[in-house]
Image (spheres, helix red, strand yellow):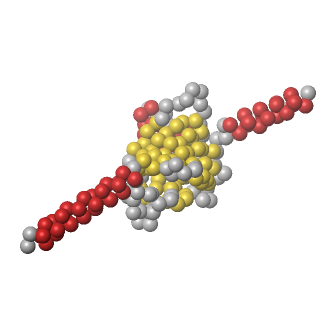
């Protein structure tokens, strides 16, 4: 009987936290000169979009609704540097995995390697003061770095983007070839003069 009650309590606890409308989840990864962000945003996204745009109180078309959602997502998740704000180059909807109570989106940011970036996420903060977003950043083969944003701390510093191995290899190979060519020319000049 105790086992049965324990299983019931565990199930109720898990199901109660599974659909928290104030929590969103994001995975971040670097691919070349891009930062790819994939996010799962709960069904409360609808209320956040409506709260951000007063013109949505009247009936609108699907195209107008989609445009309002994209405007909200573009303005709520972005990168920044000391000098500027960087909006996503691309934002798209990802397919759902079966039955879901969230929407899935992907942002693509183009980065300059010498810049230091802050990741800013204010999604759902306009309707939930307690909104929390959980972020996992994968850097190459290293373990995941985890970050959290909320209303009082809506950004975090991204680690510096490391140069890709192929780019480093190309520069080293070019330097070795140039060194070989210059030494060959100098040797021939010295030998035949």
157 or 73, which lies in front?
157
Image coordinates for residue 129, horizontal then vertical, percent: 64, 52
- Residue 25 location (% of width, % of height): 58, 44
Q: Residue at x 24, y 64 (%)?
A: 179
Compare residues 18 and 10 and report the one nearer the observer: 10
Q: Judge whether 24 appears above or below 5 on screen.
A: below
Q: Quadrant of the N terminus?
A: top right
Q: Residue furthest right?
A: 1
Residue lying at 71% horizontally and 39% vertically, measured from the top left: 17
Q: Is residue 9 left or right of residue 41?
A: right
Residue 176 at x, y percent in the picture: 28, 60
The answer to whether 99 is drawn above or below residue 88 in the figure is above
User: Is residue 61 in view from this perspective?
Assistant: yes
| Number of numbered discs overlaid on the protein picture | 0
Instruction: Name the side, left or right, on which 152 lies relative to 187.
Output: right
> Residue lying furthest front in this view?
191
Q: Nearer the viewer, residue 71 or 173?
A: 173
Residue at the image point whose x is 39% and y is 59% from the top: 113
Residue lying furthest left:
193
Q: Is residue 130 above or below residue 179?
A: above
Q: Residue at x 52, y 49 (%)?
A: 141
Residue 88 at least partly seen: no
Q: Quadrant of the C terminus?
A: bottom left
Position of residue 143 measured from the top left corner of the image (x, y, whole percent): 58, 50
Within the image, what quadrant is residue 3 found in?
top right
């Amino acid at each position: 009987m105790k086992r049965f009650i324990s299983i019931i309590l565990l199930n109720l606890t898990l199901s109660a936290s599974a659909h928290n409308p104030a929590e969103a989840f994001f995975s971040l990864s670097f691919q070349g000169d891009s930062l790819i962000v994939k996010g799962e945003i709960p069904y409360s996204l609808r209320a956040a979009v409506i709260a951000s745009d007063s013109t949505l109180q009247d009936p609108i078309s699907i195209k107008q609704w989609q445009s309002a959602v994209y405007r909200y997502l573009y303005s709520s998740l972005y990168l920044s540097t000391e000098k500027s704000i960087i909006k996503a180059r691309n934002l798209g909807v990802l397919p759902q995995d079966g039955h879901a109570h969230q929407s899935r989106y992907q942002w693509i940011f183009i980065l300059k390697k010498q810049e230091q970036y802050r990741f800013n996420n204010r999604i759902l903060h306009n309707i939930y003061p307690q909104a929390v977003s959980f972020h996992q950043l994968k850097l190459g083969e290293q373990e995941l770095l985890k970050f959290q944003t909320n209303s009082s701390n809506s950004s975090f510093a991204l680690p510096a983007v490391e140069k890709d191995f192929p780019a480093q290899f190309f520069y080293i190979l070019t330097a070795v070839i140039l060194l070989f060519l210059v030494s060959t020319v100098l040797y021939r000049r010295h030998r035949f003069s």
